[in-house]
Each structure stands twice: as C-alpha cells, then as structure tokens.
C-alpha cells in the first residue's frame, strides 16, 4: 500500500510540475528561427577587449549591438570567414547598482534580444557581444585583473549624469557621501572611484592605459570624465593624477537612440519572436546615432555599424542636447500636467507638437554653434520619432532626475537667448510647467510622483507655497543648482514665469499651450 500511495503521489506531483522554461543560451542559438538575426560568429570564441561600466538597457541596445555589427563587418559573415580569428571586442559589462540584471544575463550566457520596434514591424536581434556580466561588489578582484590586462583596450561607461559625481562647475563633488566612502572603503561605490582604482592598477602594472569612452548624455562628456578622474586621483595620489592627465585619452561622444525601460511586453514579444525565454530583452526605435571624437589606438569597426569619427563632437552634442534632450523635457512637463503617461500620448495633445517644434526652431536653434547640420530637418525627424507608437516611451523616464537635467538642456539656452534679447515664450512655458510639476499636482489635481532627487528636495522646499504662483516662482528661481544669478535676478523673466504658472494653474496645460505660444513673447 505504501508503494502504491507513493507512486500515485509522485504521479500527481509530476503532473503539477511544469517543465523548466527553454531559456535563451549559447546551446540554443541554432534553434532561433530564420527571421531572428543572431551573431554571425561564435560568441563563445570572442575574447574580451572592452570593459563597460553600466549594464542597463541603453548600453545593450546601442554600444553592445553596434559592437556586434562592427565585429561582423570586420570578421565577415560568409563561410570564408569561418577560419579567421575574431576581432577581440567582447564586452565585460559591470553593474555598480544591482546584481539582478547581471544574474539574468549570466544565466543566458550573456545573450539577450533587442526588439527594434518600427512603425510597420518589430525586428528581433540576439546580441552576443557581452561575454561577462558582473556585479562589482561581488567581482572586484576580477575587475582589478581586467584593468591590469593589456588586452582591455577600451573602458566605456553609461552611468547617467549623476554617476560622474560632479558639481555645477563640472568638478568632482568631494562632499558627496559616496565619494567620501570611495576614499575610505575597499570597494568603490562610484564609477569614478572604480575607474581611478583601475587606472592605478594599470599604471602600476606598466601597461599602456585603455581609452576611456563616455557614452552618457553630457556635453563634453570626455572632458568631464577626465576632470573627475584627475580630481579624484589627486585626493590621495598626485602622481597618479598627473599620469592620468598625461597618458589617458578621454574622447567625447554623442549617442542617440530612444530606449524605453524594460517592460513585461518585451519578454512576451521576445518569446513570440524566437520561442525562448529571455529575462533581459530591450526595446528600441530603429534609429541610432553615435558620433565619436577621434582617438589613437585600436577600436572596433564602429564606423561600419553607422558610427561617425569626427575631430569635434561639439555641434552634434549641442543639437542633440538642446533639441532632442531639451525638446523631450519641453514636451514631458506639460504632458505630465495634462495627464499623459507616454511621449506619443503627449504628442497627440492638441498644440503640443507645434509648441515643441517652435521651441526647437525658434528658441533652441539660435543657440547652436555653426555647423552644416540641417537643423530644421533634424527637428522634424524628432517629431516623427516622438509621434511613433511602435515603442512606449514613458514620460516619467524622461523626467527622471529632470531637475538636474534642466540647467544644461533648457536653462543654458534660456540665459543665452535672454542675453541676446530673443523672445522665449516656449522656454518660459516649459520652465513654468516644470515648476507646476515640482508643486506636486497635475491638471486633474492628482498627486504627481516622479523619480527626481533634486526635485524631491525642491518640492519639500515649496510645499507651503505650491498654490501661490509668485512665491513658487521666487523660491524656485533662487535655486542655484538650477538657475544662475543672471536668470534669478531677471525681473522680466520672473514676471513671465509667474504669468505662465498662473495660466497653467487656471487653464491647464491643454488650454495653455496654444494660448501662451501664440501670445506672450517675453
């Protein structure tokens, strides 16, 4: 009887247990359907030559994918290429924040799916350039060895603007708690601390330094990274700071691709595309751009993947920063007041598209440096990209840390236009919409939550005057982390902002957009 009961229970247990999911892995690459693009080389044979700090969606949809295309361009995709050695451009991606994504990628042999969502179809590409995915606190010894390895020729990073630990002047903020911790603790908390630690190992090993390649949305990102590394090194080793200043190249870059945060739909669509479970897929628009300041030394054939090497990335940085990034903020704040959750929804609000186009062409374009760019065409291309519903680009992703983004992307051009005597009605309304968002409620009186460290501090600072437009403007204009003295003491700007806040408060963003842009020209 015991035997019979045991057999029956086992049968019930077997029926209740589902088979483990068939997960994306190197052993299953051959199972991918023909319509799914996969590496035209054996990822397992790829040697690591790039150390990357940051393991997020943007890196995986941009640099890691373009590196795969570059390897294919250099190695070839025909049968005749089978006997050739692969270019040594595998990537070891390191996360300082969380082990979750590195664990997911490791379980998949570093493979993941990029879903390129176009207006007519979604294409799936499996990327195989990530040869390691590492959580820094658990793999510091391996990372130290990698920095000593002469085969690591490039160290790149996507750690967001806050990851550079700089103040408003672009110098290392030595008062930050994480910077102070990095000066004492054995395991760095910051990308800058990890880089300087690694560069010290490189110098001490007598090996030529790698190229440090910033891929974050910062104007002059290479210069900012260089200064932050020198400043940090100088806090405890002047000789190391001097070596970094003399020997290490920090080319600036400009990157552009809309990559929303990961969603459950991405997993569903990846599974539908190739029949395998993927715990780390990313979505992206078809468009991508990468402009890189020329540097000495070996590098992947990124130019064959669409990247451009130039002597000065300044014009590309400026147009992207002030049109795409500034335009994003100009549409996101009114859009959030209007109750929208995604970029395409905001672009459908009557008047918002025309408002953003005028913001870019009438107010941002005059502040750009001379170049041969077709700025009008670029601005209209941006509108078309933002209207696309093929990807869901959340407004709260754009407004994440939006208060810290405002100085470079909006306030700098506002100051330049004010000094030149040019009218700035759209910029004023965009800033006023930010102020209303800081006050905390949208046009439907719903409490607004957003991920903005500086904005959270400002919200607490203005809580008692949230419904008083004049007092709200006065307090926020006094914030030196956002506005400099010239803007803070500009009486005409102060009055225009108060009028715009009143209009938004009384009429709401949907009514204010056409009224303001066609009216006030302060």
Image: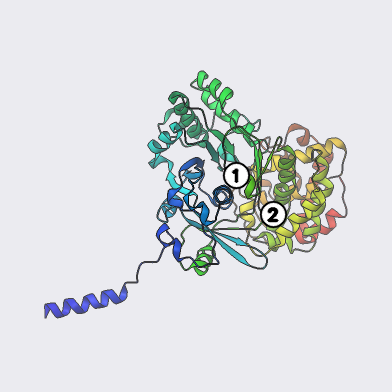
How far is mark 2 from mark 1, CA to CA? 36 Å
Query: Is residue 412 among what the camera can see?
Result: yes
Count how many numbered circles sit on residues in the image. 2
**Nearest the camera: 333 or 156?**
156
Left or right: residue 237 compared with residue 119: left
Q: Name the image quarter holding residue 343.
A: bottom right
Of the numbered discs 2 and 1, the one sitting upstream in the chain is: 1
Q: Position of residue 38 (x, y in %)?
A: 52, 59
Indicate the quadrant containing the N terminus: top left, top right, bottom left or bottom right. bottom left
The residue tagged 2 is 332
Residue occupying the point 48% across, 65% down: 32
Q: Which mark is residue 490?
A: none
Query: Is residue 172 among what the camera can see?
Result: no
Q: Position of residue 180 (x, y in %)?
A: 49, 30
Q: Position of residue 17 (x, y in %)?
A: 31, 72
Q: Are marks 2 and 1 in contact (CB under 8 Å)?
A: no
Left or right: residue 22 compared with residue 218: left
Q: Looking at the image, which residue sits at the far front? A: 80
The residue tagged 1 is 301
Q: Position of residue 78 (x, y in %)?
A: 54, 56
């Amino acid at each position: 009887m015991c035997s019979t009961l045991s057999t029956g229970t086992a049968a019930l247990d077997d029926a209740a247990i589902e088979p483990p999911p068939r997960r994306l892995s190197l052993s299953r690459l051959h199972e991918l359907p023909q319509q799914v693009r996969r590496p035209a080389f054996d990822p397992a044979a790829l040697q690591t030559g790039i150390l990357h700090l940051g393991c997020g969606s943007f890196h995986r949809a941009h640099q890691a994918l373009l590196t795969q295309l570059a390897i294919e361009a250099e190695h070839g995709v025909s049968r005749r290429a089978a006997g050739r050695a692969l270019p040594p451009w595998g990537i070891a991606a390191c996360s300082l924040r969380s082990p979750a994504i590195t664990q997911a990628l490791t379980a998949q042999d570093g493979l993941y799916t990029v879903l390129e969502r176009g207006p007519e179809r979604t294409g799936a590409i499996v990327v195989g350039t990530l040869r390691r995915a590492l959580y820094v606190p658990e793999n510091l010894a391996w990372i130290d060895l990698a920095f000593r390895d002469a085969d690591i020729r490039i160290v790149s990073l996507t750690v967001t603007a806050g990851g550079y630990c700089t103040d408003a002047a672009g110098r290392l903020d030595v008062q930050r708690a994480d910077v102070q911790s990095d000066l004492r603790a054995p395991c760095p908390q910051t990308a800058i601390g990890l880089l300087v630690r690694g560069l010290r190992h490189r110098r001490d090993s007598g090996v030529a330094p790698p190229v440090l390649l910033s891929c974050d949305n910062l104007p002059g990102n290479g210069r900012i990274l260089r200064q932050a590394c020198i400043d940090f090194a100088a806090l405890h080793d002047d000789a190391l700071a001097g070596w970094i200043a003399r020997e290490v190249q920090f080319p600036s870059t400009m990157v552009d691709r809309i990559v929303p945060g990961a969603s459950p739909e991405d997993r569903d669509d990846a599974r539908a595309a190739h029949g395998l479970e993927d715990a780390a897929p990313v979505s992206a628009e078809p468009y991508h751009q990468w402009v890189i300041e020329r540097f000495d030394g070996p590098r992947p054939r990124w130019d064959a993947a669409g990247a451009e090497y130039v002597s000065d990335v300044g014009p590309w940085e400026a147009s992207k920063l002030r049109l795409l990034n500034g335009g994003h903020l100009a549409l996101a704040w009114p859009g959030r007041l209007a109750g929208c959750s995604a970029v395409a929804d905001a672009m459908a609000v009557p008047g918002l598209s025309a408002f953003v186009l005028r913001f870019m062409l009438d107010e941002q374009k005059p502040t750009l440096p001379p170049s041969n760019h077709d700025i009008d065409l670029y601005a209209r291309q941006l509108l078309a990209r933002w209207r696309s519903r093929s990807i869901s680009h959340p407004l709260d992703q754009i407004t994440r840390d939006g208060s810290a983004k405002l100085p470079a992307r909006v306030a700098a051009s506002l100051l330049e236009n004010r000094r030149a005597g040019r009218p700035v009605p759209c910029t004023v309304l965009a800033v006023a919409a930010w102020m209303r968002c800081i006050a905390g409620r949208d046009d439907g009186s719903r409490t607004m939550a957003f991920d903005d460290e500086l904005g959270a501090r400002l919200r607490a600072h203005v809580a008692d005057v949230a419904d008083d437009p004049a007092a709200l403007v006065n307090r926020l204009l006094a914030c030196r982390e956002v506005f400099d003295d010239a803007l803070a003491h500009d009486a005409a700007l102060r009055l225009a902002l108060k009028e715009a806040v009143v209009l938004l408060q009384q009429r709401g963003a949907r009514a204010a957009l056409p009224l303001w842009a066609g009216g006030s020209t302060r």
